[in-house]
Image: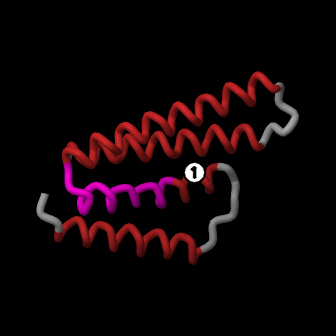
Amino acid sequence: MIPFLVVLATVALQIGAALVLKGLADRPQAPMLLLAGGMALVVAFNGLRFVMWGVAHRRYPLSLTYPMSAVFFPLMLLISHQFGEPVAARQVAGTVLITCGVLWMLARVKA
């Protein structure tokens, strides 16, 4: 359970960075200070994510942690839907296939 929480935290940071970038992209006329602050936040999120991945890979096998990061796909699909972006049935099907494949792989890995 602990490896999943560490990986989930890295995914949350990745999604946070994506949301900040989306917010900045939606405001092309934003003041320079807001843009610089947003970019600094993205760099901070990704820096923390890098450190957390290092910790995760030092403590847990890559064959366990890396597939867990696929939780990013269904979360990003939900966020896209929340932003009103079109989500096609094949995108949902692909996300379901990826998620099922990862779950199947994780069930076979001995932690």
Which is the main secondary structure of the residues drawn in magenta? helix
Q: Which quadrant is home to the C terminus?
A: bottom left
Element carrying mark 1 = helix
Residue ID for mark 1: 79
Is 23 contained in the magenta span?
A: no
Amino acid on which disc 1 is placed = Ile
> Which stretch appears magenta?
60-75
Q: Is residue 23 left or right of residue 106?
A: right
Q: Nearer the viewer, residue 38 or 57?
A: 57
Q: Position of residue 94 (x, y in %)?
A: 49, 74
Q: Position of residue 110 (x, y in %)?
A: 12, 63
Q: Is residue 64 left or right of residue 33?
A: left
Name which residue lies at 17% across and 70% down: 108
Q: Is residue 54 left or right of residue 90?
A: left
Q: Nearer the viewer, residue 99 or 111?
A: 111
Q: Is residue 51 above or below residue 87?
A: above
Name which residue lies at 63% across and 66% down: 87
